[in-house]
Amino acid sequence: MAGWLIWWDDVSSFFDPDLMGSLPDMRVPDASVQDWQAVLDLVADKGWKCQYSEGETALRMPRAEAVLARPADAECPNLRVWPTADVLAIFRFRAADAVDFDIDLRELQSQDRLDVFCGFLREIGRRLGKPVLMDPEGDVGHPMLGFDVEADRVVLLADPPVR
């Protein structure tokens, strides 16, 4: 684990909801339907608790191609995934070309939770062979940290803001 560890004291300002907004934009750019399916397969393979829903209706998880083929004006389905009981990621099926999800920063306020988060990003990035990026809420395109495929770990991509 130490090979991919980021220290809480070094990045805590990235996880301050007052500075960054509570829901940073998490994304895997340049994705495909196959990448979405790989994420769904990863969730199943890892045995992470999950719940797929369309609106308020919880449903059995369909294949990614079926979800992403929904009409453009249909309500955006989501998949709630708990890599641990205390950390929730919400995947939103907006488009095939970007796997995007939210994590509530209020759930990531310690080294232990940061380790879970980094491990989660690493699992996704390794499965897809692609970067997994965290942008400030509403500021897509300016990643703060993310899984680096070449380094095989989560790395800082910007300097943390000063509190």
Image (cartoon, helix red, strand yellow):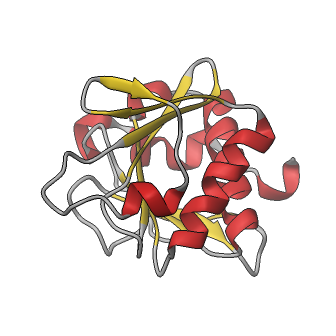
Which residue is found at the position 26% from the left and 24% from the top?
56
Q: Quadrant of the C terminus?
A: top left
Residue 121 place in picture, x, y as percent:
63, 54
> Which x, y percent locates residue 128?
68, 69
| Residue at image point 53% right, 39% down | 61
Q: Quadrant of residue 106?
A: top left
**Quarter location, residue 4:** bottom right
Residue 48 seen from this side: yes
With 44 as the anchor, is 3 left or right in this view?
A: right
With respect to residue 135, does 20 lie above or below? above
Q: Is residue 152 left or right of residue 51?
A: right
Q: In front here: 135 or 80?
A: 80
The residue shown at (31%, 56%) is 136
In the image, residue 50 above or below residue 16? above
Q: Position of residue 123 (x, y in %)?
A: 73, 54
Residue 87 spot, x, y in % from top left: 55, 27
Residue at 69% across / 31% down in the picture? Answer: 48
Vertical placement of residue 58 versus 94, above or below: above
